Amino acid sequence: MKKIVLFLTMATMVMSCNKHALNTGIQNDNLDTTANPTADFYQYACGGWMANHPLEAEYSRFGTFDELRQNNLKQVNDLITGLGITEHTQGSVEQKIGDLYKMVMDTVRRDSLGVMPAYKSIEPLQEITSKEDLLRYLGTSLECSMWAMYVEADAMNSNMNILNECQAGFALGEKEYYFDQDEHTVMIRNEYKKHIAKMFELFGYLDGDLAADVILRLETRLAGAALNNVELRDPVANYNKMSIAELQTMVPEIDWRTYLDLGGMHTDSINVGQVAHLKEAGKMWQEESLEDLKTFFIWQIIDGSANYLSQDVFLENFHFYGQILSGRQEPTPLWKRAVGMVNGTLGEAVGQMYVKQYFPEENKERMLALVKNLQKSLGERIQALDWMSDVTKAKAQEKLAAITIKIGYPDKWRDYTALEIDPSLSLYENVLRAAKFEQDYSLSYLDKPVDKAKWYMTPQTVNAYYNPSSNEICFPAGILQSPFFDMSADDAFNYGAIGVVIGHEMTHGFDDQGCQFDKDGNLNNWWTAEDKAAFDARTKVMEEYFNAIEVAPGVHANGAFTLGENIADHGGLQISYQAFSQLLASGKAQLSKDESAYTPAQRFFLSYANLWANNIRDEQVLQSTKSDPHSLGKWRVNGALPHIAAWYEAWGVDESSPMFVPEEKRVHIW
């Protein structure tokens, strides 16, 4: 399973008001004051923003955080295009960034090459005449597999890296797409088959329909043995460390030593994430014909290369994954795709340029001070819990105190010397070079101590994370700016926005997944049995509450899948509001003098709600409900706030309100 829990957040502490008067931060244009805030707080707080930001054709969803992401793309685009003004030495970072960007922008050349760049991978695959040779091909391939391998900290020994295996091989991603019988999902499967057939035709094959039947059948076999997204959230069930000899006994159909050595994975142990899936892959290797397996892997090359080839291939790929799956009407503009490619390939090199231009050093210090303030608030809340024993509280406090805080950018930048970007080659060939560079970088950590200074996001990323195996929270520079934090706004606004999202990240260390890892990042139970039972009972209340939410006609939210993020939202609200209320009580809160419309407490909740303002297409609602561990934006507001006592007080919510939840039915965790 992926252990890094992703979540958007941002940064900086409130500035002093000794030079400039602070404003409320509340933009009236974002509100819909015709709505009743006690009946639909999301509409009240965000209705104006949604009306003013209708979805453009390229988006399946667009919200305030997407708006910041687009602003960052423009900033990075300016940096990259600025490199084109002068010539750069071959092999320099500037040359690599500039040439890769230009290759993505050069659609004329890609159209002239057609699908030929991908044939360099397909042709040797077509010539294979035995499964032994097919396995050798897979051992060196960056494009084909029935499983995935990666290097990560050992969940039981977080100071050491280990080879991990996880389920893969079904392009629709979520197993439900292969089995659910509702009208929409059946339509997706039918369109997927048409898409496969069309792509094979674009690559010059005459039997696209037959290939589609084979591929859907094999992917369905793999998906049938895979864990669903709820099961993947159980770190204990997904930890199955064994020797390579034991792996060979468990899945004897594959010559594992040969496969691993060819891929540069020279190790004696492995964590098999999903045992049933890997066993099924072994059975398929034995039972399926060589030709069907080759067809399956040819599809993976076609599918994986589509975004880097000619326009006809790109547009067919977009038709299915963009239009059918998510409802987008047009592809992302070319310049944005070019920036995304550079960010994904040379991320820290671009990040170094980005922070120099856009991230003042004082922001880092201010952010650290605010994080420490929220850390103090969570510690106070833990100590005040009436359902947790002193023994477990002491362990929780130790874990909280041990959290590593990363802000802005890494102390040491990645070295991209070994990555060659050659403009004489095709874009896809350079993509494969970049993939090999990343694979070598990952494998360089295999069976070695974990690099605690390593970052898992680039500085320009508009996002943040908590990583349980290192017990760290990370806030990249990209998210540490307006509209998520307003240096000219008062404490009410900034605690409602920045405070909540920072508290959210901290709470991930104590959600239903994070709570299973100790202060050192090891998968290790630090709870008494009684306290863990009490915790589970309280999280069950939240799970069942979200299960009852109807996100589309006949479709309900998945409370078990979104449980970790919902717990973190709840904790972030509680932690930040407590810190803010203490600041108010101390008389030290820096508040706007404009109190004409809303109280400080009301502004706190308005600023929180506006973080999740967004418009979203019906197709994306259905896709996100299957694939996104975060609740939909509307329900991160209307689903979270009814469990926060301070919200009731701030907005005068009583039993007559449609959003009212009786005290005994509310969530009470952190």
Image (spheres, grey):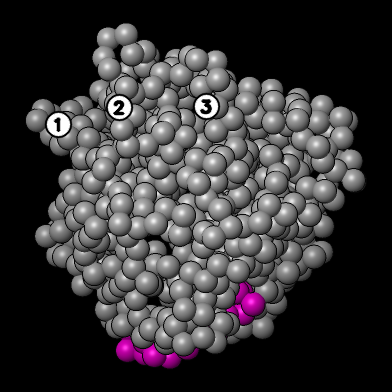
Indicate whether residue 603 is drawn in magenta: no
Q: Is residue 330 left or right of residue 448?
A: left
- As measured in the structure, the alpha-carbon distance from the residue carrying label 2 to the one carrying label 3 is 18 Å
* Residue type at numbered disc 2: Asp
Residue that badge 3 annotates: 580
Please give the range of residues in magenta. Answer: 205-224
Which residue is located at x 25 percent, y 23 percent?
Answer: 357
Q: Of the residues under marks 2 and 3, which one precedes in the sequence?
A: 3
Q: Nearer the viewer, residue 276 or 594?
A: 594
Placement of 231 over or under 341, stated as above or below = below
Q: Single out the residue that lies furthest toward the right.
A: 529
Residue that badge 2 annotates: 594
- For numbered disc 3, what is the local secondary structure? helix
The image shows residue 561 at horizontal and vertical percentages of 61, 61
- For numbered disc 2, what is the local secondary structure? loop
Q: Is residue 149 left or right of residue 301?
A: right
User: Disc 1 vs disc 3: which is toward the camera?
Assistant: 3
Q: Is residue 265 left or right of residue 114?
A: right
| Residue 265 visible at all | no
Q: Of the residues under marks 1 and 3, which one precedes in the sequence?
A: 1
User: Disc 2 vs disc 3: which is toward the camera?
Assistant: 2
